[in-house]
Every structure is written in structure tokens, then in C-alpha cells.
Image (cartoon, rainbow, N blue to C red):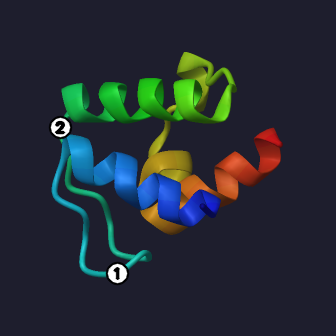
Amino acid sequence: MSTRDRVRALLAEVADAPATDAAPLAIDSLALVQLVESLEDALQIRVAAKEVTRENFGSIDAIVAFLETKS
């Protein structure tokens, strides 16, 4: 499973996914925390609180780009 597919799947578990990968995510803070925790568990990474920004988690494209810096 690609990183993009994994992000889509995990996002679908906690919130409604946007129509396109570039569309802004419209999720509440609890869903965002759940998404980050799920990504950390699934990808065996750590995401610092200061990294949870709109720039890094504002869209699926942004999340994938951010995760590529973690690998």
C-alpha cells in the first residue's frame, strides 16, 4: 500500500475525506489527533506537536509530502 493510499484509508476512519487530494481537509482537532496517532502507529514514526500545522496536515497532498520527509 502506498503512503498516499494509507493516508486516505486512515483519514476515512476518522473523518470524511475530501473530493481531491489537493482539497483542504475539513476535520476537527480530535480527528486530526486521531489521524496523527494512526499515522505514527502505521508508519512507525513520531510527529512532534510543532509539526502538526496546516502546512503539513492541510490536505492529503500536504500530509504525503510531510511524511516523505520522515522516511
Nearer the observer, 24 or 44: 44
Name the residue at the bottom extreme: 20
Mark 2 and mark 1 residues within 8 Å of each other at the beta carbon: no
Nearest to the eye among marks 2 and 1: give it. Answer: 1
| Side (left or right) of 36 relative to 42 | left
Alpha carbon distance from label 2 to label 1: 18 Å
Mark 2 sits on what residue? 28
Nearer the observer, 10 or 61: 10
- Residue 15 placement (x, y as % from top left): 18, 48
Nearer the observer, 44 or 62: 44
Q: Residue 39 carries which label?
A: none
Query: Residue 58 is drawn in which quadrant?
Result: bottom left
- Identity of the residue drawn at 68% across and 47% down: 67
Above or below, 12 relative to 61: above
Above or below, 54 relative to 19: above
Q: Residue 20 carries which label?
A: 1
Query: Residue 47 is drawn in which quadrant?
Result: top right
- Identity of the residue drawn at 67% across and 59% down: 65
Label 1: which secondary element? loop
- Amino acid type indicated by mark 2: Asp
| Side (left or right) of 23 relative to 68 | left
- Residue 52 placement (x, y as % from top left): 50, 32
| Side (left or right) of 51 relative to 58 | right
Mark 2 and mark 1 lie on one chain; the one further toward the N terminus is: 1
